[in-house]
Image (cartoon, rainbow, N blue to C red):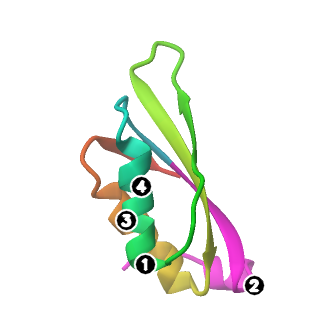
Amino acid sequence: MLDTKFDELMEFPCAFPFKVVGDARDTLADDVVKVVQQHVAGDYAPTTKASSKGTYHSVTIRVTVNSKEQVEQLYVELAKIAGVKRVL
């Protein structure tokens, strides 16, 4: 697992924004929601923005997380989505 200090910096549960940057495609936001729902069920309305050249999309999704481990797990799982370049 990741060696982070989320538990020292945050109080749980809390709303945590994940930004996923990946290759531009219409289904990226759907894939992000699918992964998040496997870990934290809920209704999500992510926002998507295209890069200036349209090569990449960034998807921002707010998730109510309950622990440091949950935040770390989501970073790892979101990074596994095909075409994803960064999870911020």
- Which of discs 4 and 2 lies nearer the camera? The answer is 4
Q: Position of residue 53 (x, y in %)?
A: 46, 12
Q: Is residue 2 visible in the rendered structure shown here?
A: no
Looking at the picture, tell me which residue is in the foreground, 87 or 43: 43
> Mark 1 or mark 2, which has the lower sequence index?
2
For residue 10, which quarter of the picture? bottom right
| Circle 1 Cα neighbour tier, 10 Å, few/some/many (<14 / 14–19 / ≥20) | some
Label 1 sits on a secondary structure element that is helix
Residue 71 versus residue 51 in the image, above or below: below
- Which of discs 2 and 3 lies nearer the camera? The answer is 3
- Label 2 vs label 3: CA separation? 23 Å
- Label 4 vs label 1: CA separation? 11 Å
- Label 4 vs label 2: CA separation? 24 Å
Residue in the image at 45% along x and 67% along y: 36
Looking at the picture, tell me which residue is in the foreground, 67 or 31: 31
- Which of discs 1 and 2 lies nearer the camera? The answer is 1
Residue highlighted by disc 4: 32
Going by the image, does 29 lie left or right of 17? left
Residue 29 versus residue 38 in the image, above or below: above
Q: Is residue 25 visible in the rendered structure shown here?
A: yes
| Circle 4 Cα neighbour tier, 10 Å, few/some/many (<14 / 14–19 / ≥20) | many
Q: Position of residue 42 (x, y in %)?
A: 55, 73
Residue highlighted by disc 2: 11
Indicate the amino acid at tag 4. Answer: Val
Residue highlighted by disc 1: 39
Q: Are marks 4 and 3 in contact (CB under 8 Å)?
A: yes
> Mark 2 or mark 3, which has the lower sequence index?
2
Indicate the amino acid at tag 2. Answer: Glu
- Label 3 vs label 1: CA separation? 7 Å
Q: Position of residue 54 (x, y in %)?
A: 44, 17
Q: Which residues are magenta?
A: 1-19
Residue in the image at 38% along x and 43% along y: 28
